[in-house]
Image (cartoon, grey):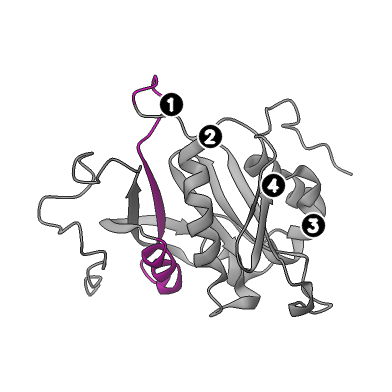
């Protein structure tokens, strides 16, 4: 077992959220082996900032950055009905949460594409994130919104963000870089804390309608 390196950092409180089909529980350092079959796949990691993970030691270090530290609150996604998994499918099918306020993260679920698990997980996690994330009025560490960012080409993730209630806010030009895919434009989606609005927080450009969460068509290069 490798040294995690960040073991002295604080872990978030253990929390379990159950939905109709999923069990979401706080990510643990011991989950590295279960995540390795997911984060070792190029088709998963192409939408992140990293190369595929190749061994357990790398997986442990990858996971420690998402399980320990301030602003970290991630959940392992598991199916409640284990009969729907196969012998080649890990118990954990993905991760959902935040590794740095106010950004959210969603990785995995690729073997169950089209079943709505990612949307179901994100909808359940958003209230938990707002509950744990400090208010913007509390020092310099709080926020009154959650945001998700993905490459313009990643239409599936954009649909998940929209279905979970996030609204399109802006497009970044050539600011999303992955070792496998190179640079691309990104799209940013956000959702305000209950009782707040994105417009009130100054997070929607004046020309964008708050009810219109569809990103613009990328310019022809």
Q: Which quadrant of the rendered structure holds the N terminus?
A: top right
Distance, label 4 to label 3, CA atoms, is 19 Å
Q: Residue at x 68, y 50 (%)?
A: 25
- The residue to which callout 4 is attached is 27
Confirm whether the magenta stretch covers residue 216.
Answer: no
User: Which corner quadrant holds the C terminus?
Assistant: bottom left
What residue is disc 3 on?
A: 55
> Which of disc 1 and disc 2 is earlier in sequence?
2
What residue is drawn where x is 76% and y is 31%?
7
- Nearer the observer, disc 4 or disc 3? 4
| Distance between the alpha carbons at the discs numbered 2 and 4 | 13 Å
Question: Toward the viewer: 150 or 92?
Answer: 92
In the rendered image, which quarter is residue 115 located in?
bottom right
Q: In the rendered image, which quarter is residue 96 located in?
A: bottom right
Cβ–Cβ below 8 Å for labels 2 and 1? yes
Picture coordinates of residue 46, whole percent (x, y): 54, 66
Apparent side of residue 9 relative to residue 70 in the rendered image (left or right): right
Q: Which mark is residue 71?
A: 2
Give the vertical position of 116 relative to 129 (above or below).
below
Which element type, helix, strand or loop, lies under badge 1? loop
Q: What is the spatial separation of the Cα atoms under label 2 and label 1, in whole angstroms?
A: 9 Å
In the picture, measured across the screen, residue 162 lies left or right of residue 209, that is right
- Mark nearest the camera among 3 and 1 is 1
Q: Is residue 187 left or right of residue 27?
A: left
Q: Quadrant of residue 43?
A: bottom right
Which secondary structure lies at badge 4? loop
**Is residue 145 shown in magenta?**
yes
How crowded is the residue under tag 3: few (<14 C-alpha within 10 Å), some, or many (20+)?
Answer: some
Residue of label 1: 141
For discs 3 and 2, the disc positioned in front in the rendered view: 2
Q: Residues within 10 Å of mark 4 (few under 14, many from 20)?
A: many
Alpha-carbon span between mark 3 and mark 2: 26 Å
């Amino acid at each position: 077992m490798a040294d995690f390196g960040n073991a002295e950092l604080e872990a978030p409180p253990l929390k379990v959220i159950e939905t109709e089909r999923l069990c979401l529980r706080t990510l643990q350092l011991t989950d590295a082996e279960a995540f390795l079959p997911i984060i070792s796949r190029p088709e998963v990691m192409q939408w992140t900032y990293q190369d595929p993970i190749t061994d357990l030691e790398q997986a442990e270090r990858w996971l420690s950055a998402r399980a320990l530290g301030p602003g970290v609150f991630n959940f392992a996604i598991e199916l409640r009905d284990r009969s729907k998994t196969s012998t080649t499918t890990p118990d954990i099918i993905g991760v959902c949460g935040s590794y740095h306020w106010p950004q959210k993260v969603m990785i995995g679920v690729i073997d169950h594409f089209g079943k709505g698990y990612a949307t179901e997980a994100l909808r359940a996690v958003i209230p938990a994130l707002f509950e744990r994330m400090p208010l913007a009025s509390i020092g310099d560490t709080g926020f009154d919104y959650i945001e998700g960012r993905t490459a313009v080409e990643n239409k599936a993730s954009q649909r998940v963000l929209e279905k979970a209630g996030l609204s399109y806010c802006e497009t970044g030009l050539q600011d999303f870089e992955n070792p496998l895919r190179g640079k691309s434009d990104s799209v940013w989606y956000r959702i305000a804390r209950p009782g707040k609005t994105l417009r009130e927080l100054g997070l929607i450009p004046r020309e964008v309608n708050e009810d219109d969460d569809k990103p613009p068509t990328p310019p022809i290069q």
